[in-house]
Amino acid sequence: SFWLDHIHPEDRKRVATAAACQEHLPYDEEYRIVTPSGQVRWIRDRSFAIKNAQGETYRIAGIAVEITAAKQMEAYICASELRHRALVELSPHAIFVNCEDRIVFSNLACAKLLGAIAPSQLFGKTVLEIIHPESHPKVQRRIAKIRATNQPVPPTEERFIGLAGSIIDVEVAAAPIMFEGKPAIQIIATDIRTRKDLERALLETNLQLHTI
């Protein structure tokens, strides 16, 4: 038919099959059409059967709406998310995502910092499991502030606990993000153990000098 002839070849068979069944089954399809100028447009096509008193279908009613702009935006967002994810994966900083107070994503640097074999070893853990108890109140206040304001919080020093129990001094930045359609918090942690060791050594040296 004229209509099917203008549907993109990759979508034509699927749409033709769905259209043939629309008298008996719900019909709600998204597909591409090719215009006479060769442009590709996206369409959302819906229809429903209208039945008489005997339950027999006597007419098919429907509506078709162009959704090209929405599809283009969807593709742009998907590409942006993939680029962001690739940058996060390769970052030398430890990065993880807190969604509903559990770790749902971690890059390799974060797994290494916490002594995990792979990022997946951290998935599902509560955020407080990797936070030293002395840092719990601060972390909980920061999480509550991010959720209340939907704004990043300034970097601060905290202490993490590795899977083997080691204490890890870190500087942490946190910001709200969307992760797989849900509100979440992205945490970027920088290992500052070397700096803290130097600070403690300098303090100890100064104390020794004051006693001389």
Image (cartoon, rainbow, N blue to C red):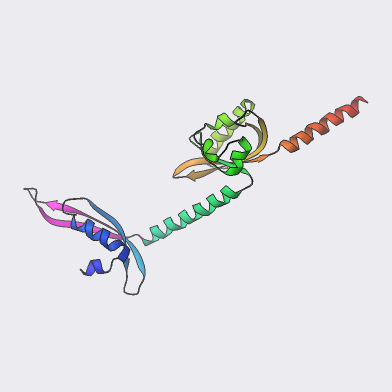
Q: Is residue 86 left or right of residue 35?
A: right
Do we see residue 114 in this rendering? yes
In the image, residue 89 above or below residue 62: above
In the image, residue 68 above or below residue 90: below
Do we see residue 149 in this rendering? no
Name the quarter where the C terminus is drawn: top right
Q: Position of residue 148 (x, y in %)?
A: 52, 37
- In the rendered structure, does residue 52 fall within the stretch colored magenta? yes
Q: Nearer the viewer, residue 16 or 117?
A: 117
Q: Residue furthest bottom?
A: 37
Q: Position of residue 179 (x, y in %)?
A: 48, 44
Q: Residue furthest right?
A: 212
Looking at the rendered structure, the number of numbered marks drawn on it comes to: 0
- In the rendered structure, does residue 21 fall within the stretch colored magenta? no
Question: Magenta part mainly helix, strand or loop?
Answer: strand
Q: Position of residue 126 (x, y in %)?
A: 52, 31
Q: Residue at x 28, y 56 (%)?
A: 29
Name the quarter where the N terminus is drawn: bottom left
Residue 110 falls in image quadrant: top right
Q: Is residue 134 left or right of residue 127?
A: right
Q: Position of residue 145 (x, y in %)?
A: 56, 36
Q: Residue at x 81, y 32 (%)?
A: 201
Residue 208 falls in image quadrant: top right
Q: Is residue 3 left or right of residue 52?
A: right
Q: Which residues are magenta?
A: 45-67
Q: Residue at x 26, y 53 (%)?
A: 28
Q: Nearer the viewer, residue 194 or 38?
A: 194
